[in-house]
Image: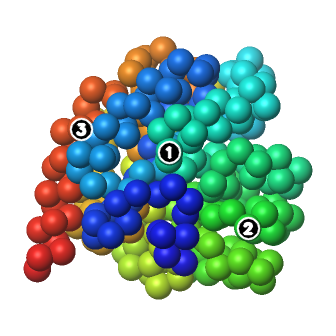
Amino acid sequence: MQLSDVPKLKHTDSNNFFLLCGPCAIEGEDMALRIAESVVSITDKLNIPYVFKGSFKKANRSRIDSFTGIGDEKALKILQKVSQTFDIPTVTDIHEAADAGKAAEYVDVLQIPAFLVRQTDLVVAAAKTGKVVNLKKGQFMSPEAMKHAVQKVKDSGSDKAWITDRGTMFGYQDMIVDFRGIPTMREIAPTVLDVTHSLQQPNQTIGVTGGRPDMIETIARAGVVNNVDGLFIETHFDPANAKSDGANMLHLDNLESLLTNLTAIRTTINNL
C-alpha cells in the first residue's frame, strides 16, 4: 500500500518517515486536543506525515483496578473530533472482532495489539472494514512470522497492512529490539518501529509496567538509520500522571527536538 491511501495524511511526498504519535489512552477531550495540536504543529514544520494515536480502551491490564478507559463511544468520538479539528488521520487499537466495525466508524487505522496479532477473527474483522490495519509484532514472534499475519489481511481482501515492531521479550521484565528484523519485515509490508513500547519493562511485582524513557532517542535514531518506514511514539504533557504507560512515554516538551534530530538523520540517509 501507499501512504497516500490513508485519508487526510499530509506530507506524503516528503521522503520522511511517517509518525504515529499521541497518548497511550484517551483520558478526555481537552488532553487529546492539546496533545494533537502540539504534534500537528511540529510535524507540519518538519514535513512529517502524521497519524494521531490514542487507545479508546485498554484491555491488557496487569491489575483489575488499572485504568481501562472513559467509555468506548465517548473516547471514539474524541478521536473523531481530533481528526475533524486538525484534518488528520487517527489510529486506535482494537481487542475483539466486534470492536472493528465500531471503531472503523471513527478512525482511519485499526491497530492489532502485539499480544493479539495471531487472533485470526480479530485480524480478519479489521481487514474487512477496509481500513489500514497496523499489525503489532508479537513479543513472542520472529520478524519472518509476521508474513502470516499480513497474509491474513490480504486473504481478507485488503492490501492495507503495516507491521509495527514493539520489541521482543528478553527475560521476564525487559524488551529488546532486534534491528535485523526491520529489513526482513519491510520486505513484507511497510514497517513501523514502536519506540516507546520497546522500552517497557513489564511484569513488575507492583503490577504497574516500568520503562526506560531515557533511551527513546537511542532506539529512535537506530530505527531511522535502518530505514524504518514509520515511528510510533507515545507522548503526554504530564507522563508521571498519565493513566496508562506513563513510565515509558516521551514528555511532550521533548518531542520537537527529538523529531528535528531524527528528520536530519533521515535527510542524511536519503542523500547517501
SS class, disc 1: loop
In percent of the image, x 51 and y 55: which residue is there?
8
Please determine whether, in this image, residue 249 is positioned above or below residue 90.
above
| Residue 114 in view in this figure | no
Q: In the picture provided, is 262 more to the left or to the right than 134?
A: left
The disc placed on residue 256 is: 3
Q: What amino acid is found at the position of numbered circle 3 in the picture?
A: Glu
Return the residue nearer the eye: 18 or 113: 18
Say which quarter of the image contains residue 1. bottom right
Q: In the picture provided, is 201 more to the left or to the right than 270?
A: right
The disc placed on residue 68 is: none
| Position of residue 29 measured from the top left corner of the image (x, y, whole percent) | 59, 21
Return the residue nearer the eye: 258 or 178: 258
Q: In the picture provided, is 107 more to the left or to the right than 72?
A: left
Q: Which residue is mark 1?
A: 87
Please determine whether, in this image, residue 151 is positioned above or below residue 244.
below
Label 3 crowd bin: few (<14), some (14–19), many (20+), radius 10 Å: some
| Position of residue 122 measured from the top left corner of the image (x, y, whole percent) | 81, 60
In percent of the image, x 49 and y 75: which residue is there?
2
| Residue 12 in view in this figure | yes
Q: CA distance from mark 2 to mark 3?
A: 33 Å
Return the residue nearer the eye: 250 or 21: 21
Q: Earlier in the sequence, mark 2 or mark 3?
A: 2
Q: Which residue is mark 2?
A: 130
Q: CA distance from mark 2 to mark 1?
A: 20 Å
